[in-house]
Image (tube, rainbow, N blue to C red):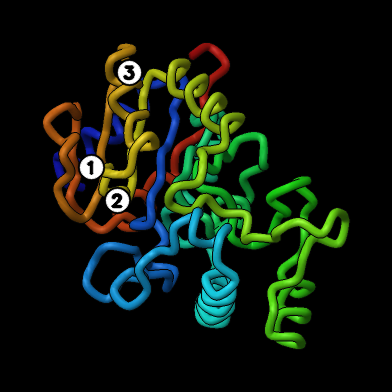
Amino acid sequence: MTLEHSELHTLIGNANRIVAFTGAGISTECGIPDFRSPGGIWTNNMPIEFDDFLNSIDMRKEAWQRKFRLDDEFSSATPGRGHKALAHLVHTGRASHIITQNIDNLHQASGVGPDQVIELHGNGTYAKCLDCGERHELPWVRERFEGSGTPPGCSACGGLVKSATISFGQPMPQHEMTRAEAATLNCDLFIAIGSSLVVFPAAGFPLRAKQNGANLVIINRDTTELDPYADLVIQDDIGTVLEPLMDLAPLSPLN
């Protein structure tokens, strides 16, 4: 075990309320590429702005075509070592919440309940009506889209149906932001994992935790602009760093 890894274990052992914050880097070992790196999802597909989705049928068609292409390629992904290690921290009472920028549902698939996963950028495994909020399953959307060539309207109100993710220019989910703020202010150790920490307001939570007195750990392949504020920075393979946490015992009730 390296000195940095030992320091991580010490910080976790001394903590009572851990919050993990995850970005795309935790899912790359699961076969899901990140967004910004060469070969990432945005290499060939720049994101579609929310206003463009709203105002253009062609953009809505393009958005759904991209969605189903990506689903065909990545929807069979299963949780990696990092997801499983964080689930272990939750199950042992060490971590209260996982705040995630990811839309892949892998934290839930690793066994973490919805009350303890806070999805800042939504979830890509289903769709929602932008008008009434009705949930629509993706096979229902796909069957109608591919059958007619036109994205279907909401079955409840006829409104626009969109993948339940947050696009650029789309308002952040206020309920989830409020939950994330509360969890951040209640933790004594905040671990940011696999995030470039450049997308705000989500990237503001690590600093918020540090300013509130929590220890801050950043685990990422590359440097981030928030590294100077962290108590510990580990630039290493995420799964390799987190997998040993599976051996941690449940948090003592006396802590």
Mark 3 sits on what residue?
214
Q: Name the mark nearer the viewer: 3 or 1.
A: 3
Residue, x 33% and y 69% (percent of image)?
Answer: 42
Q: Name the mark nearer the viewer: 3 or 2.
A: 3
Q: CA distance from mark 3 to mark 2?
A: 21 Å
Q: Residue furthest left?
A: 228
The x and y percentages for residue 72 are 57, 82
**In the image: residue 75, left or right of residue 148:** left
Residue 46 falls in image quadrant: bottom left
Residue, x 52% and y 76% (percent of image)?
Answer: 62
Residue, x 58% and y 40% (percent of image)?
Answer: 117
Amino acid at pointer 1: His
**Element under disc 1:** helix
**Viewer-nearest residue: 124 or 174:** 174
**Viewer-nearest residue: 125 or 105:** 125
Q: CA distance from mark 1 to mark 2?
A: 7 Å
Numbered-mark total: 3
Mark 1 sits on what residue?
5
Residue 241's mark?
A: 2
Q: CA distance from mark 3 to mark 1?
A: 19 Å
**Could you tell which of marks 3 and 2 lies nearer the N-terminus?**
3
The x and y percentages for residue 229 are 17, 27
**Element under disc 2:** helix
**In the image: residue 24, left or right of residue 170:** left
Residue, x 63% and y 50% (percent of image)?
Answer: 111
Asked if the residues shown at circle 3 and circle 1 are in contact, with their CB atoms under 8 angstroms apart, the answer is: no
Q: Residues within 10 Å of mark 3 (few under 14, many from 20)?
A: many
